[in-house]
Image (tube, rainbow, N blue to C red):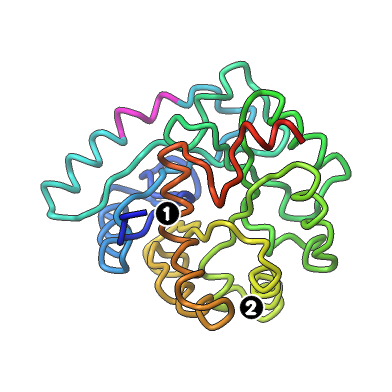
């Protein structure tokens, strides 16, 4: 693909919406950090569950932020998205996908991987959507037994997104070890920032890319932040795994 800058499909950059950016000032700093770090496209993925059924309510805010970024000379464009709680199944689920694509970013509980994980993912496939499993390297069940993730992917064809800071070691040795093991096993399709603020969980993915490059090589690491996430935003197949093929499994 021709894109040379990076795409981040997991970022809590919307001001005052969830546990991400507190206000417009912090959002502008986060966007500037992303721009400096090499990212030019960000999916504004707010947390979505049963208490939020209107995914379209943030579209005017995204448009406003894009105008503000241009005014400030920040080379970042926001596209809509969401990080949905696993099992969230509203009638308008398609409104929560990344940039109106078939790709849906799905978050399982931080405490464990439920026994119904595969049925949940299959339910999304039955809706014509292609799940992306968010930050599995931080899930205790998968840290203990990475085969749980491998089996989910084999059974559903879901994509896997790890957090750049996990690979870089920001979240500790155990999570870093799991993230790098998943990379070595070829189980990772996308690396995102999962940024929440301007200081600790930032939008700059460069350290994660450097760390991943040491594990899988520079070109493979760049695909995780460039080609593959851009394919998601453009609703194209990732690494040859199209949603239509996955549904036939």
In whole angstroms, how far apart are the C-alphas of marks 2 and 1?
Answer: 22 Å
Q: Position of residue 149 (x, y in %)?
A: 77, 56
**In-front residue for pair 198/237:** 237
Of tags 2 and 1, the one toward the viewer is 1
- For the point 58% across and 70% down, which residue is it? 166
Q: Is residue 34 magenta?
A: no
Q: Quadrant of the N terminus?
A: bottom left
Residue on which the image places disc 1: 8
2 and 1 marks in contact (CB < 8 Å):
no
Q: Position of residue 154 (x, y in %)?
A: 78, 50
Count of numbered tags: 2
Side of 218 where 181 appears, left or right: right
User: What range is drawn magenta here?
Assistant: 56-61
Which quarter of the picture shows residue 248?
top right
Which numbered circle lies on residue 172? 2
**In-front residue for pair 179/175:** 179
Q: Quadrant of the C terminus?
A: top right
Kind of element beneath mark 1: strand
């Amino acid at each position: 693909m021709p894109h040379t800058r990076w795409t981040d499909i997991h970022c809590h950059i919307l001001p005052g919406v969830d546990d991400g950016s507190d206000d417009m000032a912090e959002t502008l700093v986060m966007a500037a950090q992303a721009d400096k770090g090499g990212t030019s496209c960000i999916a504004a993925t707010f947390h979505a569950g049963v208490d939020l059924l209107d995914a379209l309510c943030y579209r005017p805010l995204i448009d406003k932020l894009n105008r503000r970024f241009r005014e400030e000379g920040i080379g970042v464009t926001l596209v809509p998205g969401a990080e949905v709680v696993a099992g969230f199944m509203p009638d308008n689920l398609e409104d929560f996908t990344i940039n109106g694509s078939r790709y849906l970013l799905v978050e399982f509980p931080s405490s464990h991987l439920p026994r119904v994980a595969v049925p949940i993912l299959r339910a999304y496939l039955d809706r014509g959507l292609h799940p992306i499993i968010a930050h599995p390297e931080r899930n205790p069940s998968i840290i203990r037994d990475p085969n749980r993730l491998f089996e989910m992917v084999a059974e559903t064809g879901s994509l896997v997104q790890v957090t750049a800071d996990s690979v870089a070691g920001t979240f500790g040795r155990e999570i870093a070890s799991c993230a790098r093991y998943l990379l070595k096993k070829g189980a990772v399709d996308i690396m995102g920032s999962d940024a929440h603020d301007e200081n600790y969980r930032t939008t700059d993915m460069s350290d994660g890319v450097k760390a991943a490059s040491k594990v899988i090589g520079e070109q493979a690491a760049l695909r995780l932040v460039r080609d593959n996430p851009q394919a998601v935003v453009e609703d194209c197949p990732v690494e040859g795994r199209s949603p239509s093929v996955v549904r036939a499994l």
